[in-house]
Each structure stands twice: as C-alpha cells, then as structure tokens.
C-alpha cells in the first residue's frame, strides 16, 4: 500500500473491512486522484460525520492558483456563504491538510470538501488548499512556503474573496502540525488563532524524518521546542484523539502541553477519549459532534462571530455493517 495511506486511512482500513460505504452527499465533487474501486482509498472521500443546514447551498470557487508553480494540482478552493451581502467581508478559516502526495488531491477529499462547506454554512469563508508536504519525505520548508503563500494570497485578495483580511485562522491536521510553528512563534497580525487537530507537535525523534530532514529543519518546525520562543502568542486549540492509532501523535501532544505551560502560552486542549486519528469522518458519536462544536465555538470567538448565529450540528447516519 502506498505509504501515505498508512496515515491518511489508518482508521478507515478497519471500518472498511467491517462496514459498507455510506452514500456520498449530493454536493460532493468527484476526486480523480482517488481510486473509488479501492476499498481503502475510497475512504478518503468520506465526509464529516456531522452537518449543518445549508451545507449544500454554498458558493464554491475551485482550483485557484495561489502560488507560483508549474504543478497544476497545487490549487485552492474557496467556500463562501450564500447569504453574504455584496461587499460584505467575513472571517476566513484556512484548512491545512497533513502529509500526502499532491496527486491524491487532498483539497478534494470528502472531509475537506465538507470542512469548507461547514465553515461557509457557519458564517465563515472556508479556504481549502493543496500544499506540498509529502509523506514520508515531508519537505517541511517547501510546505511552509505554500502555507505562507496561501495566507498571503487570501490576505491580498480579500476584497475579491469576500474575506475580512484581518480575521484569519488556521486549522492544521495530522502531519501538517509542524507547519503551525511559525504562527505560534511570530504570527502576522491578521492571524487570530490556530487549531491543531490530531497534530504532530514534534518530529525530532521520528527516525524516518531524521533521515529525510536536517536537524535544523526539525528543530525549526517543532512546536514543542519553539513555543518558548513565541514573540506574538496567538490562541491555540489542540484536539487530541485518545485512541489515535499513530503513537507519535499523542506522544508529541503530551510533550507540548508542559512546554506550553512552562512558556505560559495561551492554549486549550480538547480530548476525544474514544476517537481515532480520523475521528471527524469515522467516529459517529455525540462526543465527535461535541468536539467539532467546541472547535467551531473557538473559531467563532476568536474571529468575532456571534455564537448565537451558529446553525445546529447534527450527526449523519452511521455506516452500517
């Protein structure tokens, strides 16, 4: 099996062997980078296990070139609230996927399409983009350049995108965790908060990364190491899955907590005791719904949206055996 799938569908492989594929929502675009005939790859197209009213009524701008590259797959999608008035500026949430190959088009995975729509239906502008952090050869500096380019693109083109350029937040997933480091240390003024969902917070002791990245790079992109050097702390929320199948994820989160406390960094942590690495698309439970609701509440607070206008979350029907 292609190596990136060890992380991307580590939880899906278990459920795929025991369950039938749930029908995909009508709004989901096909992804040419995913083989839907492969039981494991097809799990990448699962949407979130929650939804809100209006996710199907969202304006989507697809495949925007946000950085200079010859790679036509390094693109951005923008999800806009349909009820946004002409000239209105909404805060934006930028979703940063984990490590994979661009050929799998991660911005078009079911979970990321759903996240963009969930954000827009909740009153934000949702920004989903493919960057070039791979797996296992991550090339962290190149990925960090892509994330910085995406933020800069949204900030510079805020008027065209319907975004308030001073109200941006990052939501970072899995092996994308190290890419949050620059924004914990010295974030631009327009970055108001950061969320890490099952994030790697340190890769310095992971043998295959030590073979592929320099010590200096692993140090530079270690939130555990760099949190003490923060010059402009922005509020951080960490979402931890208690049954994460990848041991180094929780090990790194558990190392970050005392480091952040020692630095008096402004952070909070939410734990999903029964959740696995891909719980947002796999674990149909009230706790999953609660964790996603807490994440949205964190974004609303720090981006200045009233909590009273958040549409109600509902669980989708679970996958049946």
Image (spheres, helix red, strand yellow):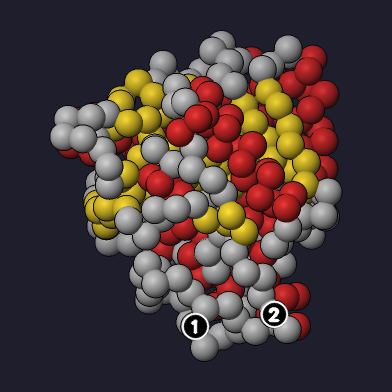
Q: Quadrant of residue 16?
A: bottom right
Whether residue 121 is visible, yes or no, is yes
Q: Residue at position x 35%, y 40% from top?
A: 125
CA gap between label 1 and label 2 equals: 19 Å
Q: Residue at position x 33%, y 49% from top?
A: 79
Q: Residue at position x 66%, y 75% from top?
A: 319
Q: Secondary structure at mark 1?
A: loop
Q: Residue at position x 39%, y 37% from top?
A: 124
* Residue toward you, 78 or 27: 27
Residue 227: give x, y in percent of width and height.
67, 21
* Left/right of residue 312 with respect to residue 82 in the rendered view: right
Q: Quadrant of residue 270?
A: top right
* Left/right of residue 254 with respect to residue 101 in the rendered view: right
Q: Which mark is residue 36?
A: 1
Can you tell which of label 1 and label 2 is closer to the viewer? 2
Residue 215: give x, y in percent of width and height.
66, 37
Q: Which residue is mark 2?
A: 320
Quadrant containing the C terminus in the rendered view: bottom right
* Residue toward you, 316 or 145: 316
Q: Residue furthest bottom?
A: 37
Q: Quadrant of residue 228?
A: top right
Q: Earlier in the sequence, mark 1 or mark 2?
A: 1
Question: Circle 2: is it few (<14), some (14-19), or many (20+) Cα within 10 Å?
Answer: few
Q: Which mark is residue 23?
A: none
Quadrant containing the N terminus in the rendered view: bottom right
């Amino acid at each position: 099996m292609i190596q990136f799938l060890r992380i991307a569908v580590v939880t899906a492989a278990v459920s795929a062997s025991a369950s039938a594929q749930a029908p995909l929502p009508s709004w989901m675009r096909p992804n040419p980078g995913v083989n839907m005939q492969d039981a494991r790859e097809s799990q990448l197209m699962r949407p979130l296990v929650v939804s809100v009213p209006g996710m199907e009524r969202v304006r989507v701008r697809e495949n925007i070139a946000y950085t200079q590259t010859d790679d036509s797959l390094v693109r951005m999608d923008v999800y806009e609230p349909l009820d946004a008035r002409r000239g209105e500026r909404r805060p934006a949430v930028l979703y940063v996927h984990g490590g994979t190959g661009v050929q799998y088009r991660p911005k078009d995975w079911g979970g990321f399409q759903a996240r963009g729509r969930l954000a827009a239906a909740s009153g934000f502008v949702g920004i989903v983009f493919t960057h070039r952090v791979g797996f296992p050869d991550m090339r962290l500096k190149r990925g960090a350049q892509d994330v910085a380019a995406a933020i800069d693109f949204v900030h510079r083109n805020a008027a065209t995108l319907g975004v308030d350029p001073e109200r941006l937040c990052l939501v970072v997933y899995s092996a994308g965790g190290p890419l949050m480091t620059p924004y914990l240390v010295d974030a631009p003024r327009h970055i108001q908060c950061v969320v890490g969902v099952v994030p790697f917070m340190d890769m310095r002791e992971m043998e295959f990364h030590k073979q592929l990245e320099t010590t200096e790079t692993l140090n530079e992109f270690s939130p555990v190491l760099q949190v003490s050097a923060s010059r402009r702390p922005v509020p951080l929320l960490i979402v931890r899955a208690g049954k994460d199948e990848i041991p180094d994820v929780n090990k790194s989160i558990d190392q970050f907590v005392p480091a952040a406390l020692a630095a008096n960094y402004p952070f909070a942590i939410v734990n999903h005791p029964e959740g696995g690495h891909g719980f947002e698309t796999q674990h149909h439970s009230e706790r999953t719904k609660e964790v996603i609701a807490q994440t949205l509440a964190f974004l609303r607070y720090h981006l200045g949206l009233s909590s009273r206008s958040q549409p109600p979350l509902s669980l989708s029907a679970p996958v049946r055996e």
